[in-house]
Image (cartoon, helix red, strand yellow):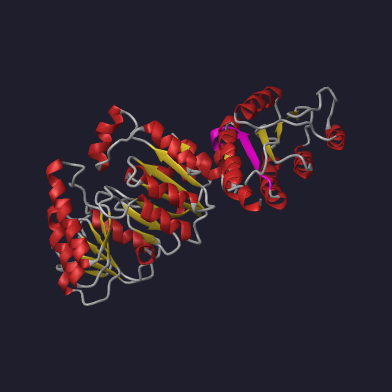
């Protein structure tokens, strides 16, 4: 699988220099993201694209090629794949649609393609997909134009049965300060499926967190065994759970629905964290960018008494304990209180503390408490007054979370402009609602108990 993600040379079949040509977008994505290997173009009209020759036939190219990408009508694929096999190419991406997701009679076409691939020892991605993104080496193969500035590099790899979901995730991640290393759109999973990609990503040094979007499960037993074999968090967004969604999923990626209760139980037994929306998936990615929480004892701090109460309710709902702070901690907090009219408890109402620089000190002392396993900090601030201090608080949360190896789930409330500005101010995950943060913080605790704590005993 390594050559699939790290090819030294690529051939793109289905390219022309006309403005509406989708194959052109693949080539320009590779250029935009600085793929360093040779890129060979094939298209029946010939010509040139950005200084590169467009060959009219695959046979004209006299070079060693690791990976071929097809974006041509489905019925041309078998012949083109046969030619690629004769050239010694062992990995092929079929981005074209029009297979079994479109009509049952096209299953014969898929069977023919798979037979050729087996004979020629070619592994296939797709068909009906937008393919692979590897930000480590600039391998960016989708047929939609992508902007390098809008995709952040990071430790997350995401595999999806839908190209649209990959695209949505890239857009959401750009708003959530989340970085990817690899993304895969699997399409119909004619050959390679989620288990093949999962096995590779488990061994991939650049991948620390793995997400899967599935409309069907190819081999549930293998999926569970792979998930059990790794310490890396595996998060699954499983859809296609009801009759109505099954109808569209079937024509979308040729997926078949299974029993959802059985699916949920199996995923849980394997230590896989299941989510039900893309936003939950993003929240899970965020929490696993923080140190794992090693126990259920939580400190809650809020600038609002009402916010503290709601956060405490959510914490108990997700299985956390709100234990008392030490006397020395509370004594220190009282020194920063202005009027002394707010009761010092856990959850801690900081509404009487107006020095935001003092918040850093309070946060650090909470993390120093031996019985505290993590902190939820809910912060709202005044525009025109607290921006610099809030930015410093975010940077402090990042620094202290790493130093004390405890998670700080930071929730921030602001207006839209300030919200995005603050998110860009530090490479640190920020939540909106305490409930969102606590739901996935429970994933973190479960992951520690299932994967890491058992290794220590």
In the rendered image, residue 392, in percent from the top left (x then y), is placed at: 70, 45
Asked if residue 221 lies in the magenta stretch, the reply is: no
Number of numbered discs on residues: 0
Residue pictured at 78% horizontal, 43% vertical: 370
In the rendered image, residue 168, in percent from the top left (x then y), is placed at: 39, 42
Residue 167 appears anywhere in the view: no
Q: Quadrant of the N terminus?
A: bottom left
Residue 421 appears anywhere in the view: yes
* Furthest residue in direction front, as rendered: 457
In the rendered image, residue 83, in percent from the top left (x then y), is placed at: 16, 68
Asked if residue 416 lies in the magenta stretch, the reply is: yes
Decide: is 121 above or below 330: below
- Whether residue 382 sits left or right of residue 132 in the image: it is right
- Whether residue 345 sits left or right of residue 279 in the image: it is right
Most foreground residue, 247 or 359: 247
Decide: is 289 above or below 12: above
Q: Which residues are magenta?
A: 406-417
- Whether residue 189 sits left or right of residue 159 in the image: it is left
Within the image, what quadrant is residue 242 found in? top left
Most foreground residue, 228 or 255: 228
Residue pictured at 22% horizontal, 52% vertical: 96
* Furthest residue in direction bottom, as rendered: 62
In the rendered image, residue 371, in percent from the top left (x then y), is placed at: 76, 40
Most foreground residue, 28 or 8: 8
């Amino acid at each position: 699988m390594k050559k699939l993600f790290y090819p030294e040379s690529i051939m793109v079949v289905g390219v022309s220099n006309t403005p509406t040509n989708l194959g052109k977008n693949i080539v320009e994505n590779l250029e935009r993201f600085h793929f360093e290997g040779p890129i060979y173009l094939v298209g029946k009209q010939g010509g040139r694209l950005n200084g590169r020759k467009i060959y009219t036939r695959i046979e004209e190219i006299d070079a060693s090629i690791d990976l071929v990408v097809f974006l041509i009508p489905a019925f041309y694929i078998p012949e083109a794949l046969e030619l690629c096999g004769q050239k010694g190419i062992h990995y092929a991406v079929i981005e074209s649609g029009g297979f079994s997701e479109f009509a049952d009679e096209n299953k014969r076409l898929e069977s023919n393609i798979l037979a050729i691939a087996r004979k020629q020892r070619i592994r296939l991605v797709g068909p009906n997909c937008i393919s692979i993104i590897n930000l480590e080496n600039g391998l960016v193969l989708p047929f939609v134009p992508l902007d390098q500035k809008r995709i952040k590099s990071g430790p997350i790899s995401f595999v999806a049965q839908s190209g649209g979901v990959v695209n949505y995730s890239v857009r959401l991640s750009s708003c959530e300060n989340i970085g990817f290393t690899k993304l895969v759109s699997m399409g119909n999973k004619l050959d390679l499926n989620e288990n093949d990609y999962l096995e590779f990503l488990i061994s991939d040094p650049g991948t620390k967190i793995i997400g899967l979007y599935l409309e069907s499960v190819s081999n549930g037993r293998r999926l569970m065994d792979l998930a059990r074999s790794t310490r890396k968090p595996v998060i699954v967004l499983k859809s296609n759970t009801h009759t109505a969604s099954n109808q569209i999923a079937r024509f979308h990626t040729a997926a078949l629905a299974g029993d959802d209760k059985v699916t949920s139980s199996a995923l849980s037994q394997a230590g896989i964290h299941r989510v039900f929306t893309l936003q939950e998936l993003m929240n899970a990615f965020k929490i696993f960018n923080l140190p794992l929480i090693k126990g259920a004892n939580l400190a809650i701090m809020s600038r609002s008494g009402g916010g503290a109460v709601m956060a405490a309710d959510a914490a108990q709902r997700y299985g956390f304990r709100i234990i008392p702070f030490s006397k020395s901690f509370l004594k220190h907090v009282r020194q920063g209180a202005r009027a002394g009219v707010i009761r010092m408890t856990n959850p801690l109402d900081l509404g009487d503390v107006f020095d935001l620089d003092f918040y850093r000190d309070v946060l650090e002392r909470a993390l120093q408490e031996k019985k505290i396993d993590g902190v939820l900090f809910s912060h709202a601030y005044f525009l025109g007054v607290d921006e610099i201090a809030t930015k410093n608080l975010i940077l402090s949360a990042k620094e202290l979370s790493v130093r004390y190896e405890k998670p700080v789930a930071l929730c921030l409330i602001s207006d839209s402009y300030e919200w995005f500005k603050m998110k860009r101010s530090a490479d640190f995950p920020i939540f909106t609602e305490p409930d969102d943060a606590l739901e996935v913080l429970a994933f973190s605790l479960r992951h520690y108990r299932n994967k890491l704590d058992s290794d220590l005993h």
